[in-house]
Image: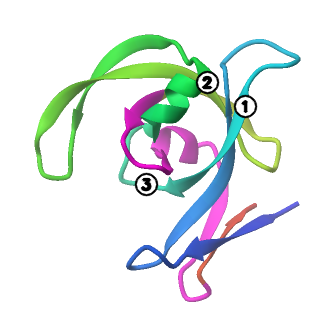
Amino acid sequence: MALTFGYRTEYDPPAPVLRVVVSLPVGAGAQPTEQISALGDSGADLSCLPAYLIEALGLIEVDEVQVEGYDGSTQIKPLYAARLSLPDSHSELVRIIPISSGEGLLGRDVLKSLRLELNGPQRRLTLL
């Protein structure tokens, strides 16, 4: 079953944004989860989540990585383990970089496992 998400017009140009559920990477039953908007970003190697959410869920730091910004500057960032789930029941364990933004970014680490269609003229993203 295909799921369709509208582009967010707060971005210029409008951009595809999905709703994802974030949780601890392991465990069953009653564990904390949060639903958040995440921008589909094919230019990002790794997915990112707001730092406040990482702290609120108690995600565990598992590594560090050197990241390079769009301006060419580099810095070392911690990596956290998380489970991201999409409304179509797709669930994936990922390494997350904290960011100061209020929205997440779905990088190629997640996008590579999805079949999706970007329809710019109609401003919608469809998970196939």
Residue at image point 54% right, 33% down? 53
Residue 106: in magenta span = yes
Q: Would residue 6 appear left or right of 99 to someone viewing this image?
A: right
Residue at image point 88% right, 17% down? 29
Q: Secondary structure at mark 2?
A: helix
The magenta stretch spans which residues? 96-122
Gap between marks 2 and 1, in whole Å?
Answer: 7 Å
Q: Secondary structure at mark 1?
A: strand
Quick check: marks 3 and 1 in contact, CB under 8 Å?
Answer: no
| Nearer to us in this view, 116 or 93 | 93
- Amino acid under disc 2: Leu
Residue 85: in magenta span = no
- Amino acid under disc 3: Ser
Residue 59 image point, x, y percent: 55, 18
Q: Would residue 16 appear left or right of 21 to someone viewing this image?
A: left
* Circle 1 residues within 10 Å: few <14, some 14–19, many ≥20: some
Label disc, if present, on residue 42 of the rendered structure: 3
Residue at image point 11% right, 41% down? 73
Quick check: marks 2 and 1 in contact, CB under 8 Å?
Answer: yes
Closer to the N terminus: mark 2 or mark 1?
1
Q: Secondary structure at mark 3?
A: loop
| Nearer to us in this view, 82 or 57 | 57
Gap between marks 3 and 1, in whole Å?
Answer: 25 Å
| Nearer to us in this view, 102 or 104 | 102
Q: How many discs mark residues in the rendered view?
A: 3
Label disc, if present, on residue 33 of the rendered structure: 1
What residue would you read off at disc 2?
57
